[in-house]
Image (cartoon, helix red, strand yellow):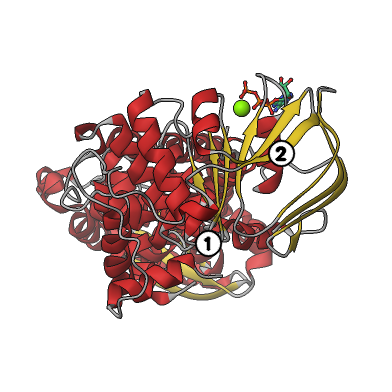
Amino acid sequence: MKLSSMGYLIKEGFKNIWNNRMMSLASVVVLVSCLIITGAASLISLNVSTLISKIGDDNELTIYLEYGLSDIDSIKLGPEIKKIQNIESCTYYSREEAIKEYKKTLGNIYESMQGDGNPFGNAYKVQLKDLAKYKDTVKQIKQISGVETVSDRSDIASKLTKLNYFVTLVGSWVVLILGIVTLFIISNTIKMTMYSRRYEISIMKSVGATNAFVRIPFIIEAMMIGLISGLLASGVIIAIYNPVRDAASGVVRLIGNSTLSVEKIWLPTLLLMSGVGVLIGIVGGFISISKYLKKEGGEILG
Amino acid sequence: MIHLENVSKVYPNGTEALKNISIDIENGEFVFIVGSSGAGKSTFLKLLIHEEKATFGNIMVNGHNLMKIKKRRVPYLRRTMGIVFQDFRLIEKMNVYDNVAFAMRAVGTPEKDIKKRVKYVLGLVGLKGKEKRRPSELSGGEQQRVSLARALVNRPEMIIADEPTGNIDPERSFEIMKMLVEINNRGTTVIIVTHEHDLVQEFGGRIIRIDDGEIAEDRYVSTKYHKSALRIDEDTDSDDGEKLPIDDTAETAENQEQKEAVGK
Ligand SMILES: Nc1ncnc2c1ncn2[C@@H]1O[C@H](COP(=O)(O)OP(=O)(O)OP(=O)(O)O)[C@@H](O)[C@H]1O
Ligand SMILES: [Mg+2]
């Protein structure tokens, strides 16, 4: 391919998009939806995995004492807890501290809890020596009188694992189906462009244009549709990432500091989605162009 | 040069469109292909441009063996020929200039070469000054001349036309035919499929009649347009009064191109 032709071919590709703008728009809309769903599912899954691994690594337990237990009685329980074999260290965590931290993470909504409204009891934060003995240790702790309950993070982890599995499964199906729909729509868009330019194609072929040359404007058209969609979709995702994350951490406190920040995800998201968009465009384009050039496009005299 | 040896074409549905045809067409010939509808004329042209593959036999066209030609070589075969369509196939959203220039862009010619050449070829077919017109702003004959200019612009060795006057009134058909003869007189092989008896009688040349897939007749008719009539008569001016530039001797840049157009 001569370089001098490239400019011309790229210009033709852009012209195609414009001349065929309704179909191009439809393709972009479908592809953007597909990419947003794919991206959202991947990001959710990625964040849940991060969360799970953080929980798994975390060998800290919180032991909640009975609500009515006095501060002195609570402190007295410290040595008793330390006696358990698997406990590495043990820190007292008073109800005042608990409410302070809770308010810090959730903001002013919980202002009303000040004063007499503290719903927390005193607690201990303990580190385990060996996570494998987790269940036994929890059982032992629960036998100590004055202990109300132990935060059971392994339960959260297993629930999250299930959620992650579900997100991945449903996500993959949705992505697969939308992917096929998108390919179909893009290849139809290109097919329509090719049909509307069938004279041009038959003339190009009659004067001896190579198939590669005939193809390029259409591939560029498909690529541009993919790229535009990728950029739009990643733009949407990046824009709504933080608000969604904040809302989610409003429900589950853990999410706030155990998930990925938007600074970490925006560039990979942008690059990946644009890349995937372009790739889908190229594949969709190639499918329809090859089909066309084999059939109708092969006819010159007709 | 075209060489067909015992060529048969059977379409997938079993129609035997050409039956054991052998024929040679030398460079520089002016050939009419005639015959009744369904005789196999278009099929013959399709074999030449390799739109269809022969079922049996041997075909050589402009140095390409079409029984063995690789797919990626087909474009280069086609660059040796210019095709004129019955329905013109002009692109409405392009003006006359771009319709012709398009054929050069399609084979990757640099823009600066395109400008000069298109201008020259449009002059040759008598469309000087109509570069900016849209196809719909032209008469049928003028449209076909644009299509002819497009077929010529890449300097083909051979012009192939399937019913080039099928959509034009008789007077203008005559003009187109004169142009094709003129192109032939400059050295380009011209092969025309037509139904129009009058034109064949008038312009003569080699006349090949295909009948039911076989060559029924192959004769030569001499007319004033060929051999002794290498120059077009002064009085046969075209509609807008422009004459075809036929003087090859002047040493102008245009004429240099003109020679190239004829060459090969
Ligand atoms: N693609 C095809 N598939 C099957 N049969 C075909 C095909 N193209 C042409 N034929 C048949 O082959 C025969 C020759 O067709 P062809 O088009 O060469 O005729 P023609 O001489 O050009 O006719 P016309 O003057 O009407 O254009 C006809 O019987 C036609 O029906
Ligand atoms: Mg025909």
Could you say where residue B152 lies in the image, as x and y percent from the top left? 43, 56
Chain to which mark 2 belongs: B
Whereabouts is ligand 1, in terms of quadrant?
Answer: top right
Q: Which residue is mark 1?
A: B187
In the image, taking residue B152 as reference, residue A295 lies left or right, namely right
Q: Which residue is mark 2?
A: B219
Tag 1 secondary structure: loop
Asked if B110 appears above or below B54 in the picture, the reply is below
What residue occupies the far bottom of the structure in this picture? B251
Give the camera-side residue of A223 and B258. Answer: B258
Residue in view at x 28 percent, y 69 percent: B116
Asked if B16 appears above or below A286 in the picture, the reply is above
Residue in view at x 44 percent, y 59 percent: B106
Could you say where residue A2 lies in the image, as x and y percent from the top left? 45, 74
Residue in view at x 26 percent, y 44 percent: B237
Separation of residues labelled 1 and 2 (CA atoms): 20 Å
